[in-house]
Amino acid sequence: MESHLYEGIEATDFYDKLENVLSTQASAFKVNVALGYKLVSKTDPDDTRYFYPNLANTYVFSKPIAINSKADIRKKIMSEIRSMELADKLNYPSSGYKLKAITALKIFIYHRGHALGDSKTVIPKIIRENKHVINFPKTNNKCVFHCIAWHTFQSAKKDPRRIQAQLKEAFKRYCLFKGIKYTLSLFRSFKPVDLLQLDEVEDCFQLGINVYSMDVASGNVE
């Protein structure tokens, strides 16, 4: 987990700080936000109390929110928070206090490590033996590019064991899109695509990509 603390911030900076931290994440994550704030007595302006931002009692969301794409940042976090009445999210020692100011923000990032097509991953038997699932013999961390190569290869006789040329073309196109120089060494050592990177993969190939998770015990798919 990593956290980012901002103190003494203006209300106008609150959303910018939050969106900046979230948009710079390179892999799928979960996030929660805690607020630091000052209360003042309704009857005595000199009676103030400060609450430090922590997840015990100043959280914004009741549980961390999963971010699977860049679009989720605005949809699940920014839009939600902007629509909230943050004063209602705070704890008050009694009804005799009111909010004076929200002065601090702490962002908690939980990294999830959702790499797609990691060669070390063992695919469950129930998936391997599904006749509707295409099993590529060995993807070497490039499962996503194998799927794209298979999708774009227009041939009635295409074979999942013989799409290396199409695979390299797909990878070269992605490198060009990213402004990366293609080399054979890069092709061989490429890390698996993370779930959060699928937005740019879709942009590169002008495709819509759906990712599902399956509970092996129950067979439920989401």
Image (spheres, rainbow, N blue to C red):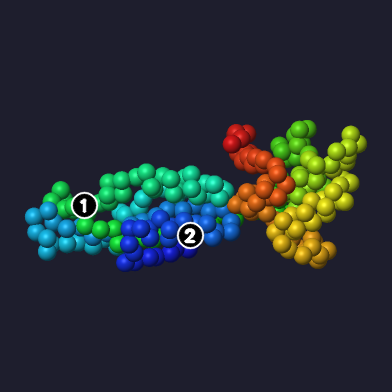
Q: Going 46% across and 56% down the picture, which residue do you hit? A: 19
The outermost residue toward the front is: 12
Q: Is residue 116 visible?
A: no
In-image side of 169 versus 52 (left or right): right
Q: Residues within 10 Å of mark 2 (few under 14, many from 20)?
A: few
Q: Quadrant of residue 58?
A: bottom left
Q: Residues within 10 Å of mark 1 (few under 14, many from 20)?
A: some
Q: Going 82% across and 47% down the picture, which residue do you hit? A: 137
Disc 2 secondary structure class:
helix
Question: x, y percentage for residue 195?
Answer: 62, 50
Q: CA distance from mark 2 to mark 1?
A: 30 Å
Q: Quadrant of residue 151?
A: top right
185 versus 126 height, above or below: below
Q: Amino acid at mark 1?
A: Tyr
Tag 2 residue: 20
Q: Going 42% across and 53% down the picture, which residue do you hit? A: 32
Q: Is residue 67 visible?
A: yes
Q: Amino acid at mark 2?
A: Asn
Q: Nearer the viewer, residue 156 or 16?
A: 16
Q: Earlier in the sequence, mark 2 or mark 1?
A: 2
Tag 1 residue: 92
Question: x, y percentage for residue 7?
Answer: 34, 66
Disc 1 secondary structure class:
loop
In-image side of 97 versus 154 (left or right): left
Q: Going 25% across and 58% down the picture, which residue do you hit? A: 101
